[in-house]
Image (cartoon, helix red, strand yellow):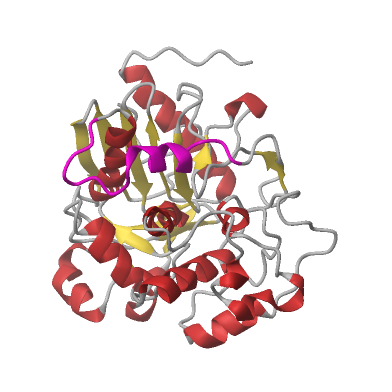
Amino acid sequence: MADISQSPVEPTVTCTGAQLCVVRGGEAILDEGFGIVNSDTISLWMSAVKPITAIAFAQLWEQGKLYPDMRVADVLPDFAAAGKESVTFRHILTHTAGFRAPHVSWKPQDNEELLEKIYAQKLEPRWVPGMKAGYHVDSSWYVLAEAIRAVDGRTINDYVREMIFAPLAMPDCGIGLTPAEQTRLKPRLGGMVELKENTLKPKTVFSDPAIVALVRPGGNGRGPMNQLAKVYQALLDALQGRQTGQGILQPTTVAAMTAAHRVGMFDNTFKHTIDWGLGFILNSRRYGEAPPYGYGDYASDRSFGHSGNQCCVAFADPTHELVVALQWNGMPGEQKHQARARETVDAIYQDLGVEPVPRA
């Protein structure tokens, strides 16, 4: 297996530790920590938490409380301000809604004030929802979480703990960790470092207790990567007809969420054509070399998942019955991270004897 504690394309060390969990055919074939990180270290998932919020939406879709083509304003009337009345949940889940700003800082903020700011945001100029694409870093995910709270009554963090993490035996995971959880898990809380001028420096903001507790539904998931892998295994089991008592979604719902709902659209945030399911990034290698947040040269076209800014990637590949959940505790810059992620994921497939996917 590749040495994931270093960049495989440059000699510069980009982190001090990493976690890797690989599951094939329902069995973990590798679950290890590297460097200063153990397999049970609580890691920061960043945007790789977005599918968790999407799964919460999907569960409420199964209950008839939310559905993709419902207008967001039908659940949250104040959202309709500034010309957003036509935006649907499908637009949010496929990143075609058109209100990418405001990008929320990592400072704790009052949730009501934050939502008011997002509700007041106008659609971007010449943006027709559904007709133009651009990754929404955080704004739309606060809206999605608030819609879940509006129809269910639970905050997004409470909801996912009870309806996703608990059934899958993921006791150390959360969208933010409460002070009590931080106390319980303190010996296992992992930190982050950042590469600055070829020197690793602590990224202390991500270890601040107030930030660790921040309920950020599109970017502050935390937990061991082997527990995040359980989510993708549950989805894969459903798709493969191995639904168990721990199933979090019905097979037809998983198929719908991971089908291509946004196809061939240029992403104005990533500056690359990327296909999207409902909350999941689909393998988009056919659109050229090295798509951002991609799954390398060996993953099948059916692969789906999500990555996190400069630190992690998690996905399932139904064709090869494979789940990969991988996190580095170092942020080396987007270009270096994308290179190490592709090289490492490719090395996993190579070790498993999988042939590369022919380029179209």
Tell whether position 260 is magenta: yes
Q: Quadrant of residue 161?
A: bottom left
Quadrant location of the N terminus in the rendered image? top left
Return the x and y of residue 95 as percentages of the image width and height. Answer: 62, 53
Q: Who's the residue at 20% across and 47% down the image?
A: 39
Q: Who's the residue at 37% across and 18% down the image?
A: 350
Q: In the depicted view, which residue is nearer to us: 10 or 270?
A: 270
Q: Is residue 94 above or below residue 181?
A: above
Number of marks present in the image shown: 0
Return the x and y of residue 253 as percentages of the image width and height. Answer: 40, 43
Q: Is residue 108 above or below residue 64?
A: below
Note whether residue 176 is visible.
no
Quadrant location of the C terminus in the rendered image? top right
Q: Is residue 17 above or below residue 317?
A: below
> In the image as oriented, which residue stretches furthest toward the right?
126
Tell whether position 270 is magenta: no
Principal SS element in the magenta part?
loop
Q: Who's the residue at 65% across and 72% down the image?
A: 102
> In the image as oriented, which residue stretches furthest toward the front?
64
Return the x and y of residue 188 as percentages of the image width and height. Answer: 19, 62
Return the x and y of residue 130 as percentages of the image width and height. Answer: 70, 51
Q: In the depicted view, which residue is nearer to us: 344 or 59?
A: 59
Q: In the depicted view, which residue is nearer to us: 44 or 304?
A: 304
Residue 146 as seen in the image, left or right of residue 251: right
Residue 214 as seen in the image, left or right of residue 275: left
Q: Quadrant of residue 128?
A: bottom right
Residue 259 as seen in the image, left or right of residue 360: left
Residues in magenta, as a range = 242-261
Note whether residue 212 is visible.
yes
